[in-house]
Amino acid sequence: MRPLSLAALTALALVAAPPALADPPSPFPRNVGPNLAADCPNPEGIAVDGRGLVYASSFAFTPSANICVLDPRGRLVRTIPVAAGPGGVASLLGMLFVPGEGLYVTDFADGVAPHGRLLRLDGQGNATVVTDGFAAPNAIARDRRGRLYVSDSFAGTITRVAPDGSGRVTWASDPALTTAGQPPFGANGLAFDRGERHLYVANTGDSTVLRLAVRPDGSAGPVEVFARGADLDVATGSTQSLHGADGIAFDAAGNLWVCANQANELQVLSPDAELVARYRGSGADALVFPASLVFRGRLLYVANLALGDAGRSQLSVMVAPLPGPPIAGRR
């Protein structure tokens, strides 16, 4: 596939923007909803359900951390408290909404094994522990058989588990899933390609995107580098490519959208691993440590973790040139 230029991506984004928000959608990131500093400081994870409700998780390090719920017009309509587990604090990261199952969220807790948890919240906001024992559980992905995959950014592992907590296995463990860089998070964002031939993994501290082949028996193949930020800097004559690669998501054409949290950008990789677009926002709408992203059709929502600047705890939205995949669990 020939990669789309930034001009072509922008032109596509301006055509037939999906209505939903109170303000006209934009092909570039802009703030959506209220400042969340009081209710969900440092929003890290983001998810959307079939009704268009947007969920943002707070990386709070408090005895109870909130998930903020925004309606399709960007209004804060609910906060869901999540109590800490054995670690004494709740610090919520990645989320995934699955119709008929609920909202999955990882709890980093205090960043010490075995306190990290994978939780599932029902429609009333009641939390169930799916599995625990993690050091730094982070992102969540789901395969077509309904199994969940959880990255552990400190252990350098990817765990596979059924929604009821059964069948837990360490699906992948490799030094390449750890990091000696900064931020000190290895395996982070997760995303399957459309055919589930590979699971893609962002390594934040290494500023790389990795991938693992999914073998016919469902086991993981070896870790390989899909795109390395330093190589893209050379190829494009730019800087900060994939710097702090965090949350990732594919669009319908197989382009991989990456939250480059240290660059304060969204960066887009073509299926051939070429860097084809970068988005920042500007002024008050600038991205601030973007950590996670989720598609709802062509609307692309972003959680700004705003580390070191919690007063700017904000969600962003833009109209992407192409839609994302269907909501997990919906075919």
Image (spheres, grey):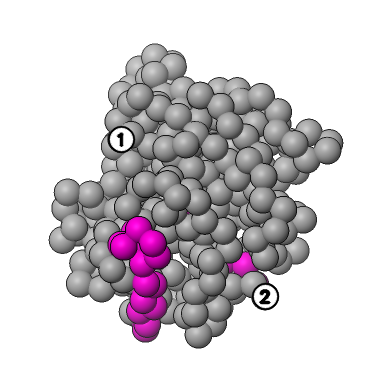
In the image: residue 201, left or right of residue 100: left
Residue at 33% in and 34% down: 184
Which quadrant, please, contains the N terminus?
top right
When the figure is inspected, residue 220 is found, relative to residue 290, above or below; the finding is above
Q: Position of residue 2 (x, y in %)?
A: 62, 29
Which quadrant of the view contains residue 104? Answer: bottom right
Kind of residue indicated by mark 1: Pro
Q: Position of residue 304 (x, y in %)?
A: 31, 54
Which quadrant, please, contains the C terminus?
bottom right
The residues tagged by marks 1 and 2 sit, at their Cα atoms, a distance apart of 35 Å
Boundaries of the magenta span: 77-99
Viewer-closest of 125 and 312: 125
Kind of residue indicated by mark 2: Gly
Q: Please say whether residue 92 is one of the residues in the magenta stretch.
A: yes
Residue at 53% in and 66% down: 129
Q: Position of residue 76 (x, y in %)?
A: 33, 79
**What number is the disc on residue 183?**
1
When the figure is inspected, residue 22 is found, relative to residue 235, above or below; the finding is below
In the image: residue 317, left or right of residue 311: right
Q: Is residue 270 visible?
A: no
Secondary element at tag 2: loop
Disc with the residue nearer the chain's start (1 vs 2): 2
In the image: residue 213, left or right of residue 76: right
**Crowd rating for badge 1 (residues with CA inside 10 Å; few <14, some 14–19, many 20+):** some
Secondary element at tag 1: loop
**Crowd rating for badge 2 (residues with CA inside 10 Å; few <14, some 14–19, many 20+):** few
Q: Please say whether residue 16 is one of the residues in the magenta stretch.
A: no
Residue position marked by numbered label 2 in the rendering = 100
When the figure is inspected, residue 324 is found, relative to residue 103, above or below; the finding is above
Residue at 20% in and 72% down: 38
